[in-house]
Amino acid sequence: MTTLLINIKELLQVRETSISKVSGADMKKLPVLENAYLYIIDDVISSVGLMVDIEIASADKIIDCTNKVVLPTWCDSHTHLVYAGNRAQEFVDRINGLSYEEIANRGGGILNSAKKLQETSEDELFAQSAKRLEEVIQLGTGAIEIKSGYGLTTEAELKMLRVAKRLKETYNFPIKTTFLGAHAIPANYKGNQDGYMDLVINEMLPKVAEQNLAEYVDIFCEKGYFTLEDTERLLKAAQQYNLIPKIHVNQFNAFGGVALGVKYNALSVDHLEELNDDDISALQNSETMPVALPSCSYFLSIPYTPARKLMDAGLPVALATDYNPGSTPSGNMNFVVSTACIKMKMTPEEAINAATINGAYAMGLSETHGSITVGKAANLIITKEIESYNVLPYAFGNNNIEQVLINGKVI
Ligand SMILES: N=CN[C@@H](CCC(=O)O)C(=O)O
Ligand SMILES: [Zn+2]
């Protein structure tokens, strides 16, 4: 099957040679071909170029992209998309004055989602999650990471990861899975944090590895959740199973989680709403991707990750949704890109780099996704007719996507 996109007004993120990520001042550079074509054979990009140079005369399917922008699909490297029900009541409680922390202390928050998930059958959990996945694909997401962490018992954690695996198989879609058993201390372990860490490390972790259910390991390293000691214990134990860290750090407090992640070669450190100079120094000369989650900052009214500070220090930044029922009930990467521009003062070029190639890096997918490069997966967004790609972040809240192609097929 061959597909030819012609008359593309702007073809974004065209990289002749594959790069793994972009950092610092390079994030301002977004390579664009104007009046371009793109040719797909089966599920991969076969050639790209200017319309004036096109030599391909026919294809099984031709898509006219006059006045439209084409770009690689979004790479959403941080989600909790597999969850049960919602926490709309807590949203209302927050409007009425309770803080995220107060809600969690009353047994709401993550524990509320864990209770719901434990009571939900695997098939029902799959059905709810599949609906969310289908929705975000229509919004232009073409690769995604999914965490466990709303199970908090061995059985429920495994159930979440099995559901993520089934999504991957059912949709033939790039999904990376992360074991986040250390997301919160369940009520029956209150006052026995070490006991819960023992369960995570000695029972959950080996089963996750043995059943090949995750590639990454995560922990919510935060005051009131898990300490630096817990984090180090987990990351050390995970090494023997070759589970790579991608960790929640610095959401509310900065106390050394970033440096610890770097020490254990974390693929990414995520959140970073609070960030100090030591964190920046730790990230310099590391291969760890800082990941910002602006929709979470928006929803919880907490600070935005200082992306400018990171980029000015020569570092890369990736953008992701954090899709989850508590702090970010939205998997919309278009909103993330807009919010990064509007609130974090990222330029459209920086935000698009952060949401494509750098997101791919944060999932270990930059060899196959995240740019328009010959040989990479033909996962593409075709916009509606727009003046330029600047309109994507500018027209926040609008859906400017007309078509999404996954593995070369319009979905
Ligand atoms: N911060 C930790 N975990 C999630 C939110 C969890 C929840 O409130 O359900 C996050 O990344 O924001
Ligand atoms: Zn998260």
Image (cartoon, rainbow, N blue to C red):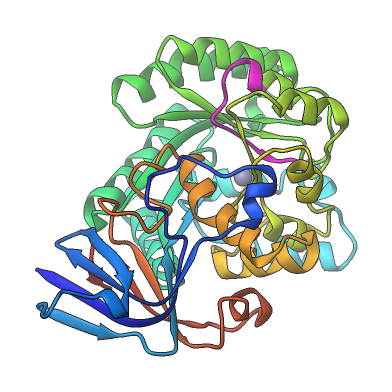
On screen, residue 229 versus residue 382, left or right, reads right
Residue range corresponding to the magenta coloring: 261-272
Name the foreground residue: 77 vs 164: 77
- Give the residue displayed 59% in from the left and 84% down from the top: 398
User: Could one spot residue 332 in this view of the protein?
Assistant: no
- Give the residue displayed 40% in from the left and 62% down from the top: 133
On screen, residue 395 versus residue 239, left or right, reads right
Q: Residue 7: horizontal and vertical position, in percent?
A: 34, 84
Q: What is the quadrant of residue 95 in the picture?
A: bottom right
- Residue 254, relative to residue 11: is it above or below? above
Name the foreground residue: 55 vs 191: 55
Quadrant assignment for the C terminus: bottom left
Name the foreground residue: 399 vs 240: 399
- Give the residue displayed 63% in from the left and 24% down from the top: 286
Q: What is the quadrant of residue 276 in the picture?
A: top right
Q: Residue 219: horizontal and vertical position, in percent?
A: 61, 29
- Give the residue displayed 35% in from the left and 85% down from the top: 65
Quadrant assignment for the N terminus: bottom left
- Does the segment drawn in magenta span residue 231? no
On screen, residue 29 versus residue 237, left or right, reads right
Q: Quadrant of ligand 2?
A: top right
Q: Residue 158: horizontal and vertical position, in percent?
A: 38, 33
User: Could one spot residue 288 in this view of the protein?
Assistant: yes
Q: Residue 363: horizontal and vertical position, in percent?
A: 46, 40
Q: Residue furthest front?
A: 53
- Does the segment drawn in magenta span residue 263? yes
